[in-house]
Amino acid sequence: MAANTIATGRLPTLLGSVALAGIGIGVYSRYLTSVAHADSGAPPKAFGSGPAFLSLQLQSTEVVNHNTKRLRFALPTKEHGASFLVCDLTRPSQEAAGVLELMVKKYPNGKQSTHLHSLQPGDSLRFVTPIPGYKWTPNKHSDITLIAGGAGITPMYQLIQGVLSSPEDKTRITLVFGVNTDADVLLKSEFEDFERRFPNRFKVVYTVSNPVPNSPYPKGYVTKELLSKVVTATPGTENMKVFVCGPPAMENALIGTRKQPGILGDLGYTKDQIHRF
């Protein structure tokens, strides 16, 4: 199969719409460079600093749930890193160099997501240019709260993986993950592993708006009441940061507008304490 171009032209704008407005691609990479981290000896960059049409071959696919697949693409060499994303980038994980993984949610009538779900190992996909991410350095914040909705979990997973894989980083993490149904809970085994290995540094809280009967998850939404109960870092008095990524309605409710502070503002968080992926 010939290489297919997923995005060209005004890439940052297009990729943002791909991720959050209906195509449904959540992306995380097991090995990322060109993001702000203090590590020395970084691997060579697959994309460099500007537009670079790069065709990558699909290594494997994995069904994650009823509408989501994980696609693993091979980078040019095992030493290469990739700074490609949809929501945002974080520090690299050193455990799987040479690959780029996409988590793709398939939407009804979504042409791009349907095409990506149809790819088979050996097919190729053309990628274009990196996008700068949040500037993270070890211990930049003592506590971070990650609030994700649906496919917005993917940049949160990147950030969690990067922070916890760094031996010198002692940042504490609280993840609040809201989804529609039990089947939409992604990366559960990975988060359970993080809780097991980092019991004093990582905590995940789930909330499901339409749980199945006898669901192990609490029913509800990401509300002011929920956040006030589960987030232990005090806004304004501690070196902490809140990261938000999810459907526009959820993000707007949390962050607010110029005239309305939103849930996080009501809880006392200032604008510079909030980062929207």
Image (cartoon, grey):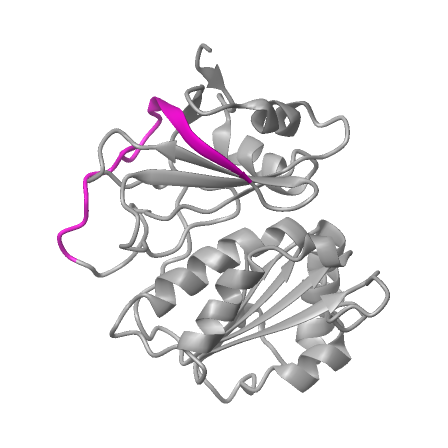
Magenta region, residue range: 40-62
Among the 4 quarters of the image, the one containing residue 83: top left
Q: Is residue 248 left or right of residue 98?
A: right
Most extreme residue toward the left is 41
Residue 172 visible to an observer of this rendering: no
Q: Nearer the viewer, residue 267 or 93?
A: 93
Q: Position of residue 215 (x, y in %)?
A: 78, 68
Left or right of 257 in this view: 68: left
Corner quadrant of residue 112? top right
How far from the left and from the top, in percent, is residue 210? Answer: 84, 60
Comparing 48 with 63, the one in front is 63
Q: Is residue 3 visible?
A: yes
How many numbered marks appear?
A: 0
Question: In terms of image quadrants, where is residue 135?
Answer: bottom left
On the picture, is 40 further left or further right than 162?
Answer: left
Residue in the foreground of this view, choosing between 193 and 135: 193
Residue in view at x 67 percent, y 35 percent: 106
Q: Quick check: 69 above or below 144? A: above
Q: Is residue 258 above or below residue 124?
A: below
Identify the residue at horizontal 40%, vertical 81% (top origin).
142
Q: What residue lies at 29% left-to-right and 35% top-to-bottom?
A: 49
- 58 is within the stretch colored magenta: yes
The verdict on residue 190 being magenta is no
Which residue reaches farthest top?
2
- Residue name at image x 65 percent, y 54 percent: 246
* Residue 271 image position (x, y, % from top left): 57, 69
Q: Position of residue 34 (x, y in %)?
A: 29, 45
State left or right for residue 117 relative to residue 82: right
